[in-house]
Amino acid sequence: MLSSERVAIAAHLHVLLRRKTGRVTDVEWMAANPEYAAEVVRLARQHALENAAPELADWAAKLEAAMRQPEPPARRPVLAPQPNLPADAAAALQGPAAPADAAAAGARYVGRLR
């Protein structure tokens, strides 16, 4: 599960806990730390049983399931360095070279900044 999905579930549970119990939680830490998330889930379930709040139990179950799922592997960048490219192809991927001096750089522009 993506970390953004975990944060969304944690944020929803945070809002419910704030409204029902007055308790403030840390959404980012809840999405990143499994121990903290487990404790928030325990608190939400306890309050759901004591005060008949089934939506707390539902969102606690969603967070618990989200924390069990592994995060997908990181994606490789599209333009990653290629070690076996010829020199001219590698230079073309990097773009145009910067001018050697400031006069050459200033000559490219029609006007100047004040």
Image: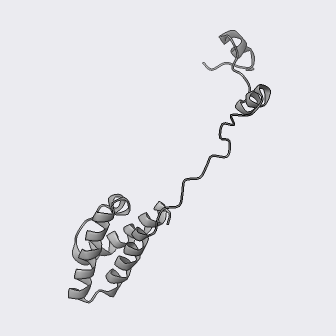
Place residue 30 in its image quadrant. bottom left
- The answer to whether 96 appears left or right of 50 in the picture is right
- Residue in the picture at 38% in, 62% down: 31
- Given residues 91 and 97, the one toward you in this image is 91
Picture coordinates of residue 52, whole percent (x, y): 26, 89
Picture coordinates of residue 83, whole percent (x, y): 68, 34
Determine whether 24 is above or below 85 in the image: below
- Residue in the picture at 34% in, 62% down: 27
The quadrant of the image that shows the C terminus is top right
Place residue 90 in its image quadrant. top right
Determine whether 73 is above or below 39 in the image: above
Determine whether 67 is above or below 103 in the image: below
- Residue in the picture at 49% in, 66% down: 1
Picture coordinates of residue 50, whole percent (x, y): 20, 87
Place residue 108 in its image quadrant. top right
Residue at the left extreme of this rendering: 50
- The answer to whether 103 appears left or right of 1 in the picture is right
Q: How is the image coloured?
A: one colour
